[in-house]
Amino acid sequence: MIKAIRGTRDLLPPHTDLWNWVEAKVRDIFRRYNFHEIRTPLFEDTSLFARGVGEDTDIVTKEMFTWADKGRAASERSQSLTLRPENTAGVVRAYIEHGLGNSSVLQKLYYIGPQFRRERPQKGRYRQFYQIGAEVIGPPSTGSESPVRDAEVLEMLATLLDELGLGGWSLQLNSVGCAADRARYNKGLREALKPVIHQLCADCQSRAQTNPLRVLDCKVPEDQPIIAKLPRISQYLDDACRENFAAVRAMLDALGVPYSVNERMVRGLDYYTRTTFEFTHPNLGAQNAVLGGGRYDGLSESLDGPKAPGIGFAIGEDRLILALQAEGVTVAESPEAYVAPLGAGMNAHALQLARGLRRAGVSVELGDETFRLKKSFEAAEKGGARYIVIVGEDEVKSGEFAVKELASGRQEQVSGKKLAEYLLGRP
Ligand code: AMP
């Protein structure tokens, strides 16, 4: 038997009803904050991620699904392609390619779709997973650099989680400063790491060489006391970055959005500048980050684009759903009515009635004329229908249908003309 590949999974009903419910809610929130959808390809030129996400990151060094795509003609060279491991680089590529920065309006773009990383699968961590993300990006003249953008995005996320019914989240906030601050901090970290490096885990020993900031992400318990004594990023922020961070925090305080500053949260992607953040939820266990994001003021330029400061985030949709399920949220759509043809020759009449009801907005499941009355009732109940509508010869003749509410057993005769309104609960 051929099975789905490890780390990938099928999403089946009724779970997909919950996924669709989440996506509909999220789209409505994006509408209220004036975001518009962008759809970029699932695969891109490998160099986009190498340059955009960062050569030394775990994603680029270990986790990408990359292949050499053969040129069509024998003389054509093959091209290295990669399934997108995240979508900020793709969105910024599209922003540059289509000259979206020429518009004098701030671009507020969102996406919903699969991402691919070759990670060790476990609960809440998959090789194909889904992200709901957004990017706010534009030339500085559009206000893209303002700390109000950071506060607005964070406030939107707090509203989003609250409206989905996922109270109990925590927002961890940090500022990683600008490129110059980070370079100085990297230097400071390297120096502080030198005398203690041999006491750290093997991963940290190599991180200390390639990307010392990553040492702060280490989860190995024995390393923690050493890491706690390392210098902190806040000591290296220049005045502008420090003021910017203070402004973001002051606006969150004014809005009443709670957060805690976590100076060790540097996040796994190289493009971040200034504000970085993560929302965690206690329902999620070890993989407790439900979303992450931050500002990336230099990303467009590092991809040969114009100056285009921006801020964005990606919600792990799989984890969002897991957290909602742990909270007891279930959504299962079931039909309003089950239309039961009763007796030979009734299928066409039942189809016609169902057609009218469906066109009027009622969700309908349809039986078959070979079913006895008892079987129709069983099918209606199993399928979760609220009402059963009997279509027999008498009903067709009179235009009056026997409608029974399954839970209460209440039965009424309803005329065909009024049936849709009746079933929708608007008599
Ligand atoms: P990142 O793009 O790494 O900042 O991740 C943003 C969010 O995507 C995380 O907070 C997770 O919720 C989710 N995420 C990242 N990697 C995975 C994965 N392999 N499986 C499921 N969710 C993931």
Image (spheres, helix red, strand yellow):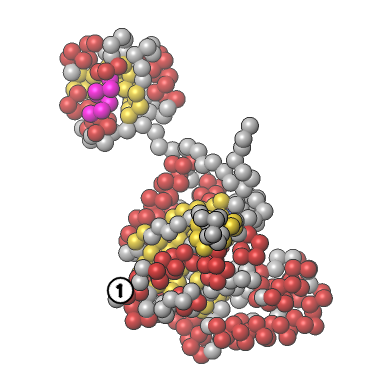
Q: Is residue 354 left or right of residue 179?
A: left
Q: Residue furthest top?
A: 344
Q: Quadrant location of residue 415?
A: top left
Query: Pointer 1: what residue?
Result: 103
Q: Secondary structure at mark 1?
A: loop
* 10 Å crowding of disc 1: few (<14), some (14-19), many (20+): few
Q: Position of residue 380 (x, y in %)?
A: 39, 23
Q: Position of residue 213 (x, y in %)?
A: 65, 76
Q: Is residue 198 left or right of residue 138?
A: right
Residue nearest the viewer, comparing 161 with 407: 161
Q: 272 above or below 406?
A: below
- Please state, as top left, top right, bottom left or bottom right, where the N terminus lies in the image: top right
Tell me which amino acid carries mark 1: Ser
Identify the residue at image location x=44%, y=81%: 247
Q: Position of residue 91 (x, y in %)?
A: 44, 65
Specify start and end residues of the magenta stretch as a single range: 350-356
